[in-house]
Image (spheres, rainbow, N blue to C red):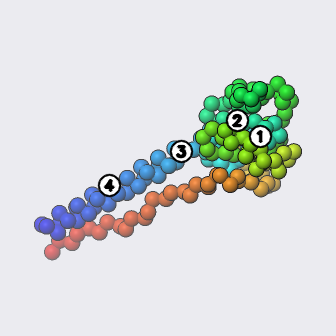
Amino acid sequence: MLKKQLYIIFYLVGILAFWSIRYSAAQVEQDNNIASQPTWGPTGYDHVDYYYLPDVECYYSVGTRQFISLSGGRWIFTAQLPTQYSKYDLFSGYKVVINKPRPFLNFTEDKVAYEKFKGKVNEQVTIKTAKINPTNPVKLPQTTPPNVVPKIPVKPPVLPPVVKPHVF
């Protein structure tokens, strides 16, 4: 009788452990914001907080869908690019993914760090392009900025099969 109770306890603990691991994995997966990213954003990122646009020296917040640009020494948040850049092609210009809060406070450092991407055109596959041609044979290199840590997928462990007790 005691043996049977132990098997039942182990079985229940195993089920509980399995579901808690699956629940944790689901919570990690909810951290993506792919659906919120603009179609002109580069592919390959499951989460983006901001894009830095080196050609126009401004940021774009994915969460608020606003461009953040410096004007008269103040940061301005707008739904459109500043007027002087209204003809700028967001699809062809280079975008740097930045996943840290309020990156515009580090504008001077970002401007220097990402200066090398200024003028680079059509070097990233955009989300729109990937949707139009999901089997795109042209795989362009994605440059991941040093402050973006790639996510490691969490897989639930494989649990051993449940052994049914033998009754003698």
Q: Position of residue 86 (x, y in %)?
A: 83, 27
Say the numbered circle drawn on residue 16.
4
Instruction: Tell which tag, 3 or 1, sits nearer the viewer.
Output: 1
- Report which residue position mark 3 lands on: 31
Whether tag 2 and tag 1 are in contact, CB under 8 A, the answer is yes
Task: Of the two numbered discs 2 and 1 on the same chain, state the one appearing first in sequence.
Answer: 1
Tag 3 and tag 1, C-beta contact below 8 Å: no
Foreground residue among 9 and 28: 28
Image quadrant where residue 8 sits: bottom left
> Which of labels 2 and 4 is toward the front?
2
Q: Looking at the image, is mark 3 or mark 1 earlier in the sequence?
A: 3
Q: Tell me the residue that label 2 is attached to.
A: 60
Find the distance from the CA under tag 2 to the CA under tag 1.
8 Å
Q: Nearer the viewer, mark 4 or mark 1?
A: 1
Residue 65 is at least partly visible in this image:
yes
Whole-angstrom CA distance, mark 2 to mark 4, is: 43 Å
Q: Which of marks 4 and 3 is in front?
A: 3
The kind of secondary structure element at disc 1 is strand
Furthest residue in direction left, as rendered: 1
Can see residue 37? no
**Residues at marks 4 and 1, CA–CA distance in whole angstroms:** 47 Å
Front: mark 2 or 3? 2
SS type, badge 2: strand
**Label 1 is placed on what type of residue?**
Leu
Mark 4 surroundings within 10 Å by alpha-carbon count, few (fewer than 14), some (14 through 19), many (20 or more): few
Crowd tier of the residue under label 3, counting other residues whose Cα lies within 10 Å: few below 14, some 14–19, many 20 or above = few
Residue 5: % across, % down = 17, 63
The residue at which mark 1 appears reads as 53
Residue type, numbered disc 2: Tyr
